[in-house]
Amino acid sequence: MQKVLDFLKSAETYYLATMDGDQPRVRPFGTIHIFEGKLYIQTGKVKPTSKQIAINPKVELCAFKDGTWLRLSGELVDDDRVEAKKSMLDAYPMLRGMYDENDDNTQVLYFKNATATFSSFTSTPETITF
């Protein structure tokens, strides 16, 4: 899991895909964090992303850097605890202008049943599950 976190942080931007009915939706994300041994992302509850994940928690993200790409698929689980939200916002203080761990909008979600695959054109794919 640490290798996944390090890659996503170094790539800075990854693209998260959700389902909106039968239509895939992809958008850029940047928050990625480990808290209590789980890999978390962050969004706002008012965003379509949050509503799509509530209906279908299966997601996939993709990032690319230096000729290597990462695909991470799994299910996102909402963690509404203040401690989880605070940990994420402490890791990304620039978000504090829009989010607070005590508001009704901040949402942090962690991956379960996750499969991460690192690929490139020059090496054998490496798969990590968590």
Image (cartoon, helix red, strand yellow):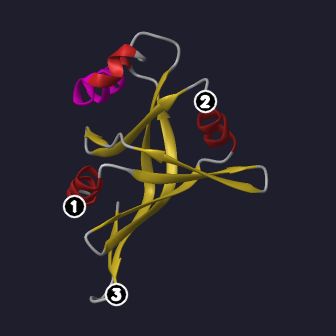
- Say which amino acid is labelled 2: Lys
How many numbered circles does the render carry?
Answer: 3
Q: What element carries label 3?
A: loop
Which disc number belongs to residue 3?
1
Q: Is residue 94 left or right of residue 63?
A: left
The structure residue drawn at horizontal position 34% and vertical position 87%, both measured from the top left corner, is: 121
Q: Is residue 126 above or below residue 74?
A: below
- Residue 46 occupies which quadrant of the picture? top right
Q: Check residue 84 for magenta coloring.
A: yes
Q: In this view, does 22 lie above or below 124?
A: above
**How far, Cα to Cα, is label 3 from label 1?**
19 Å
* Mark 3 or 1, closer to the camera: 3
The structure residue drawn at horizontal position 51% and vertical position 51%, both measured from the top left corner, is: 16
Residue range highlighted in magenta:
83-93
Residue 106 percent across, percent down from the top left = 46, 21
Q: Which residue lies furthest to the top in this view?
A: 102
Main secondary structure type of the part rendered in magenta: helix
First in sequence: mark 2 or mark 3? Answer: 2
- Disc 3, disc 1: CB below 8 Å? no
Q: In this view, does 45 lie to the left or right of 67?
A: right
- Disc 2, disc 3: CB below 8 Å? no
* Mark 2 or 1, closer to the camera: 2
- Residue 17 occupies which quadrant of the picture? bottom right
- Disc 2, disc 1: CB below 8 Å? no
Q: In this view, does 64 lie to the left or right of 61?
A: left
Q: Quadrant of the N terminus?
A: bottom left
Question: In the rendered image, which residue does mark 3 sit on?
Answer: 121
Q: What element carries label 1?
A: helix
Question: In the rendered image, which residue does mark 2 sit on?
Answer: 47
